[in-house]
Image: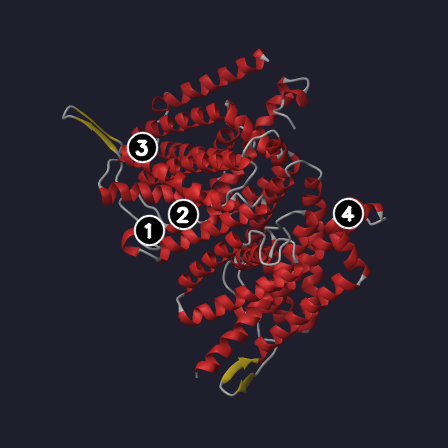
Amino acid sequence: MPKKIGIEAILIILALVVLVTMPWLTQETYVFHILCLIGINIIFAASLNAILNIGELNLAQSAFMGIGAYASTLLVTRVGLSFWFALPLAALITAVISLLIGLLTLRFRGAYFLLFTFLFAELIRILLSNFGISVFGGIPGLTNIPRPSIELGSLIKISFDSKIEFYYLILLITLGSIAILSRIDRSRTGMIFWAISQSESLTESIGIDSMKFKILGVAIGCFFAGVAGSLYAHFVGIITPTDFAVHSVLAPIAYVVVGGMGTVFGPVIGTTFLMVLSHFFLRELGFYELLVYGLIIVGIIRFMPEGLISIPNFIFSRFPEASGSGK
Amino acid sequence: MEWSLLAQGGLNGVMLGVNYALIALGLTLIFGILGIVNFTHGEMYMLGGYVAYYFFGHFGLNFFATLALSAVLVGALGVILEKFIFRPLTKRPKLELTSLIAAVGLAWVFQMLAIIAFGDLDKNVPSAFKGILRMSGVVITVERLATIIIGLCLVVLLNVFLLKSKTGMTIRAVAQDKEAAALQGVSVDRITALTFGIGCGLAAISGALIAPIFGISPNMGGEVILKAFLVVILGGMGSVPGAMLGGLVLGFVESFGCLFFSVPTVMVLTFSIIILILILKPKGLLGHA
C-alpha cells in the first residue's frame, strides 16, 4: 500500500513543521503549558499502550509514573544529580521495580494482573503519604522541584525556565519515545508481543517463552511511564501522592482507547484529540468533563473498538477488513 | 478487659467480613459465569446505599422492604448493563481487556452521575435498629448485630439457592461449561443476565445494609471495590466458599489490626499478607488450579 504510506508520511511531516514553528505562530503561555502537558501525557499513554500490547491493563501505571517522578526529584534535590542523569536513571529505577512486580504478577493471567496492579497502586499511594515523610513529604508531597538547565563551560547556558524552552525539550523527548516505541513495535519482539496478546497459549506452542516477553513488555512500558513522571515533576514543580493514585490512570485509558489500542499512533492521536478538546474547547464544561470522558470510553469500546485511527482505513481503503492489523 | 477487647474486635470483624463477603459473592459469580471483572460493582454498592437513604431515610419505607427494593432496582440496572454493554463485548475478541475498560469507564460515569444527582457530601442514614446490648463488658449496638444476622442469612440463602434450586444449578452449569449447558437446553443468555442481576443486587443490599452504620457518599464504591477485589483474590476467582472465607479473613485482619496498629500500617500489612498468600497459593485459598 505505497499510496497510504505516502499520505501518512505527509501528515506526519506537516504536524512536525507546525509543532517546530509553534513559537512563531503564537506566544500565548497557556498554549505552551497545555502543549507540554499533552507531550507528557502522550508518553504516558504510549507507555500504557505498550502494556496493553501484551494484552494486560496496568492500573498501577500512574503509580509507576509516580515512582519515576519521586525518584527523579529525589535524585536531583537529595543526591544532587543533574536532571540529565536523573531522568534516565529514574526511568531505569521505575523499570527495575516493574520487573519485580512483573515477576510476581504475570504468573496470574488477565484479571489477577489487573487486581494486583490495583493493589500495588494503592500500596504506593499509602506508602508515599504515610511513611518516610522526611524524604517523600507525606500527603503535601514535594515542592520547589527545579527546572533543568544546561551549562557547558561559561559560554553556553540554557535554562529551561520558560515554557517555550521546556516545550522544545518535551517535544524532543516525546518524539524520541514514540520513535523508539514504534521501532520496538515493528521489531520481532513487537510481533511476539502482538502474538501474546492474541493467544498466549498458541504463542507458547511455537516455543516462545511468553512469560519472558510479558515481563519485558511491562518493563518497557514502565520505563516510559518513568520518563513521563520525571518530565512531569520537573515541569509542574510539585508532586503529591494523589497525583499518581489509581483514578489518575482513567483519563490516559480514555486517550489510548479513543485513539486506538495496540497501535503506535493511536495514543498520540487520542491524547492530542481529547486534551485539545478538553483544554481549548470544553473548558466551560468543568466538572462534567470527567463524565464525558467516562461516556466516551464506554461508547468507543462498545461501538468503535479500534478507535479514531481506524477511520482512515474506512476512507482510504476499499477493503477495510484487509488493511487493518488483523482482527 | 483484654478478653472484652478481643470479643469486640471479633464482632466488628464478623460484621465487616459478612459485608465484604456479600459484595465479593456477586463479583465472583459474575466472574465465574461471564469471565468479566466487574469494576462497576462498587458503584452498585453505592447506589444501594442511596436507595436506603431516599426510600428508608426520607420516604419512611420499611427497612426490609428497602433492602429488597435496592436489590430489585440495582439488579435491574445490572441486567440492562449486561444486555447493552457487556454481552455485545463477549462476542468480540479480547473480552477480558475490553470489558474491563468498559467497566472502568462505567464506574466512572456512575460516580460522576451520583455526585451530580446527590451532591458530593457524605450523608447519614437513620438507624433501623435502636438500642445497645451489653454482655459481660462486651458492648454491641443492636444495629451491628442485626447487620451481621441479615448478612449471614443472605449468604446462607444464596448458597441454598445455588446448590439446591434448579435455577441455581443452571447457573453453576453455565459457569462450568457454556456449550454443554446450552446443549442441555439452557438459555445461556438468560442465565447470564440473571447472574449479573443477582450479583449487582447483592452489592446493592450490602450497601443499603451498611448505610446506617458508615454513612454514604458517591465515592464509597471506589473504596469498597478494592476490599471486594482483595476478598476475591484471597478466596480464589470464581469460588463461592472462597469469597465467604476471604471476606471473614479480611474483616478480622482489619478489625484486629486496627486495635494494635494505625490504619495505614494495617493496609500495608493486609496487602503484604495477601501478596504472600498469592505467592504461596497463586489461585487463592479455595480457588481451583
Identify the mark at residue A58; answer none if there is no mark: none
Q: Are marks 2 and 4 in contact (CB under 8 Å)?
A: no
**Is residue A259 rendered to the left or right of residue B99?**
left
Identify the mark at residue B189; answer none if there is no mark: 4
In the image, farthest residue toward the right: B185
Q: Which of marks 1 and 2 is nearer the N terminus?
A: 1
Across and down, in percent, residue B166 comes to 82, 60
Real-space CA distance between mark 1 and mark 3, rounded to the nearest whole angstrom: 23 Å
Identify which amino acid the numbered label 4 is placed on. Answer: Asp
The residue labelled by disc 2 is A243
**In this view, the mark in front (3 or 2):** 2
Please tell me which residue is depicted at 66% across the width and 36% down the height of the picture: B93
The quarter of the rendered structure image containing the N terminus of chain A is: top right
**Crowding at mark 4 (Cα within 10 Å: few <14, some 14-19, many 20+):** some
Mark 2 vs mark 4: same chain? no
Q: Are marks 1 and 3 in contact (CB under 8 Å)?
A: no
- Give the chain letter at badge 2: A
The one of B278 and B220 positioned closer to us in this rendering: B278
The quarter of the rendered structure image containing the C terminus of chain A is: top right
Across and down, in percent, residue A123 comes to 43, 53
**Crowding at mark 1 (Cα within 10 Å: few <14, some 14-19, many 20+):** some
The residue labelled by disc 3 is A163
**In this view, the mark in front (4 or 3):** 4
**Crowding at mark 2 (Cα within 10 Å: few <14, some 14-19, many 20+):** some
Across and down, in percent, residue A243 comes to 40, 47
**In this view, the mark in front (2 or 4):** 4
